[in-house]
Image (cartoon, helix red, strand yellow):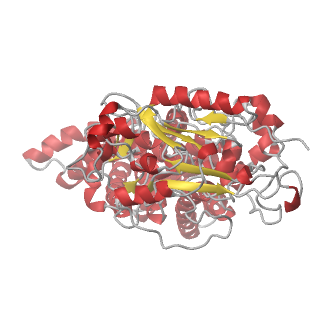
Amino acid sequence: MKRAVAIPDSDDTVRQVDLRIAPNLSAAKRPMPTGGAAWCGETYYDRPALKAAPWGHLVSGYMFVAGLGGAAQMIGAVARQSRSRNPDGVVRDARLIGAVSVLAGAAMLIADLRTPQRWYNMLRIFRPTSPMSIGSYLLTTFGAATSVGVADEVLRGRTAAGRRVMQAAPAAQTVAGITGAGLGIYTASLLGATSSPGWTENPRRMAARFASSSFASGAAALALTARMRGRLPTARRLELLACLGVLTHAAAGRVPGEKSPTTAEQRAPAKTTGSGTAALLLTVVPLACYGLGRATSPRRERLMSATGSFALLAGAFLSRNDALEDGKRGSRDARRYFAQAQPKASNRSDAGQ
Amino acid sequence: MNVPARALDYADSLLDGVIPHEAELTAGTRIVPGQRYGFFTDTTLCIGCKACEVACKEWNALPAEAGSLRGTSYDNTGGLSSTTWRHVAFVERVREGTDDGTHMQPFQSHWLMMSDVCKHCSNAPCLEACPTGAIFRTEFDTVVVQQDICNGCGYCQPACPFGVVEVSEIDGKAHKCTLCYDRMKGGLEPACAKACPTDSIQFGAIDELTERAQHRVASLQSRGVAEAYLYGVPGSPGATGGLDRLNAFFLLTARPEVYNLPAAPERASRRVAPALATGATVMAVLALAAGALLSGGRR
C-alpha cells in the first residue's frame, strides 16, 4: 500500500498524497460541505479550523442601512450637480435619509461591540490594512458632512450662522456623496479581508453586489419619499435608477474572481451564495411592480411602486444577511477552508475531487 | 543545552526573587528587546501530557472550560479559544491503508500529538485587521492584544487564518497567547515551554530555533522519518500567501490539515484593495448613469 507522502512543500508532493488513507470519519458520517469545493483528505475530526465572526443581525442591518443612506446622499450629490428638474427635493430627502441612517447605523455598530463603552477607540488610530478602520473614518466623515446638510435644511440661511452653513453645504454634499458611496462598498472589502471561505472566495463580486444593491436601495428609499411628497416625475426617475441598480446587481454575479474558477466545484459558491428569497425581493418583485405600476391607473401605480420599493429594501437587507451568514457558515466548515487554503495552481482542482 | 555556570548560584530550593535572565538557565537564551523570539514545537517529541495547557492556564489565570467529552479522542479541549492559549491535539489514527484496526503499525507512535498555539505571524492578519490598535507587535516580535484598548469589535476573529484569537463572552475583549509577554519582560521563558517535560516546545531566538529545527528535520529524515517537515518557517507550508514567517512554527509528520492547520494560509489584507477598487468602479458607473437620468428632463 502506498504510504502518504506528507510533505506539502511543493505542488508535486501534495498531489502524491493518497487521499483515501486514514480518513477520520467514514464518508457517511462526514458533514456535507456548505458550498464550494470541499477538502476530501484527512482532517482533525472535522473540527472548525477557523473562528466565525461574532456578528449578527445588527451588523447585517448596519451594512444595509449604511449602504442605503450613503447611496441616497450620493444620488443627492449627483442630483445637485446634474441640474436636474427638482434637485432641492431630492437633496433634502437624501440629507434626511442620510442623517437617519448614520444615526441608526452608528447605534447598531456600537451595540454590536462586546465592550461598547470603548466605541471611541475605533478612531484611536488609522490602519489602511483594516477596512473596519477605513469604514470608521468614512462613517465619521459622512456623519459630519450630512449634519452640515441637515443644518442647512433647518436654518435655510436665516441667521448669520445659517448663511455660513449655506455656503458650506454644497461642498459638504459632495463629501457626503463620496463617503456615502464608500459606505456602500467598504463592507464588502471588510468581509473579504478575513479568512472565512464564504467571504474570501470572490471579494470582487461581493463588492460589485454590495455597491449595486446599496445604490438600488438608496434610489428606492428616495423614490418612496418622493412619492410620499407627490413628486411623481422625480419618483419615476428614481425608480428607474433603482431598476438599474437591481439589474447591475443581477449582472454582478458574473464578475470574475482573483482566481478565475476552473472546475464546477469552484463555480458552485456563486449559486449557493444568498437565498432565493433575497433575489426574489431584491430583483424580481421590484422590477415587476414598477413595470406593472406604470401600465395601470395612477392610484394603482402608487401602491405598486411602493410595494416594489419596500420589497427592494427588504431584499437588500436579506442579501446582506445572507452574505454575512455564508461567511460564518464557511468558517465553521474546515473542509471548505482547507480546499481553498491549498498551494496555488494545479492541486487546487485536486482538492475538490 | 549547555547550562551556564551561574546556574550553581541558584542551587537553593527557595529563592529570594526572580533569577535575573532566568531564560538563560532554562532555555539557553538571554531575552533581549529588539530580537525575534518564538516557539519551535517539535510534534515528534510530544507525549500529549498537556502540561503546557495547564501551565498556560495557571500562569495567565485563564478560566477553566466547563468540560465535556467529545468522543473523538483524548483531546477534550477541542481547540484554541479565548480561555485556552495552548491546545494539545490528539490525532488518534487507528488504521492506515486498511479498513480495520488489525493492520496498525507495530508501535503506538502512530498517534500524532501536537501542542498548538498562536503563531505570532509576521504580517499578522489579526493585527492588520484590528481597527483600534489594541493588537500590536512587541519588542520581541510577538503579537499581543492590549486588554485596556480592545473594544470587542470581533474583526480579528475571522481575520486569523488559524482560528486562534477569540473575543471572550466573559469580558468582551479579544484574547490569545501573548507568548508570555509579562514573563519575557522579566527575562523568563514562557510558561508552556518551561513546563514541557520532553522539550517538544522550545523557546528561543527565531534564527537559532530555525537552525535547530532544520537540523532536527535532517536528523529525523536520516533516521527514516521521511515525512518530517517544518511548518511556518520561510519558504515552507504555513508561511505562504504573504505571511513571511510564523514565529511559532512546528515540525509535523503528516499533512497540515491532519493537525487542523491550513496548508497555504493567506494574508487577509491582500483582498482589501481589489474589493474596494471593483466596488468603487461599479458605484462610479452607477453615479454617472444617475447623473444622466436625473438631468434628462430639463434639456
Q: Quadrant of residue B61?
A: bottom left
Instruction: Tell me what residue is drawn at x 24 percent, y 41 percent.
Output: A169
Coordinates of residue B288 in the picture (x, y in percent): 50, 35
Question: Position of A24 compared to B262: left or right?
Answer: right
Residue at the far right: name it.
A1
Coordinates of residue A123 in the picture (x, y in percent): 28, 45
Coordinates of residue B160 in the picture (x, y in percent): 50, 46
Rendered view: B201 above or below B53: above
- Out of A91 and A15, give the one closest to the viewer: A15
Instruction: Tell me what residue is drawn at x 60 percent, y 67 percent.
Output: A297
Question: Position of B172 compared to B155: left or right?
Answer: left
- Out of B108 and A316, give the one closest to the viewer: B108
Instruction: Tell me what residue is drawn at x 38 percent, y 32 percent.
Output: B29
- Out of B100 and A182, give the one closest to the viewer: B100
Q: Quadrant of residue A222?
A: bottom left
Q: Is residue A94 visible?
A: yes
Question: Position of A125 compared to B142: left or right?
Answer: left
Q: Quadrant of residue A181?
A: top left
Rendered view: A32 above or below A193: below
Q: How many marks?
A: 0
Coordinates of residue A120 in the picture (x, y in percent): 25, 52
Q: Is residue A232 visible?
A: no
Instruction: Tell me what residue is drawn at x 40 percent, y 62 percent.
Output: B168
